[in-house]
Image (cartoon, rainbow, N blue to C red):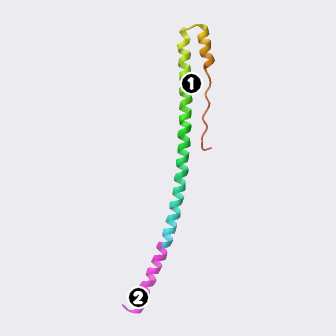
Amino acid sequence: MSGTTNKVVIGILLILALILFNKNKVLNAKNQELISENQTKSSQLSDYESSLKEANDNIDQSNSKINDAKDSIDGTYEDMNDALDSLETVENVNDPVN
């Protein structure tokens, strides 16, 4: 190979190296962005799971008290009154993200 051919090959290799270096920087930045987004989504999922558990616990508590009230129907008026007094409304669970 002649000196001119070597210089052209070296020039092409340098340009390719610069392109690959730049592409690597872009991909690393995108990777960091995706990692951050994944962490945010994981945190939101955890918040939603906690809210869902709280809502289900509230529903279970209400269902239990309703069943207790139904069971007291055959009892005395005092038993029915106590059962009705124990009934409570449950709290709504708010959207944890908003």
Amino acid on which the number 2 mark rests in the picture: Asn
Most distant residue in the left direction:
1
Q: Which mark is residue 44?
A: none
Magenta: main secondary structure equals helix
Per the rendered image, the range of residues in magenta is 1-20
- Name the spot of residue 64 as percent of width and height, x first: 53, 22
**Quadrant assignment, res 51:** top right
Marks 1, 2: nearer the viewer: 1
Quadrant of residue 13 within the rendered picture: bottom left
Q: Would you name the residue on which mark 2 appears?
A: 6
Residue at screen point 51% across, 68% down: 25
**Rounded to the nearest whole Å, what is the CA distance between mark 1 and mark 2?**
83 Å
Q: Amino acid at mark 1?
A: Ser
Q: Is residue 47 magenta?
A: no
Which is nearer the N-term, disc 1 or disc 2?
Answer: 2
Tell whether 93 sits left or right of 28: right
Q: In this rendering, is residue 16 above or below 71?
A: below
The image position of residue 49, as x and y in percent, is 53, 40
- Residue ID at (61%, 20%): 87
Q: Residue at x 54, y 59 (%)?
A: 33
Q: Is residue 30 above or below residue 4?
A: above
The quarter of the image holding the N terminus is: bottom left
Q: Position of residue 15 (x, y in %)?
A: 47, 79
SS label for mark 1: helix
Residue 10 belongs to the span the image colors magenta: yes
Q: Which mark is residue 62?
A: 1
Q: Position of residue 76 (x, y in %)?
A: 58, 7
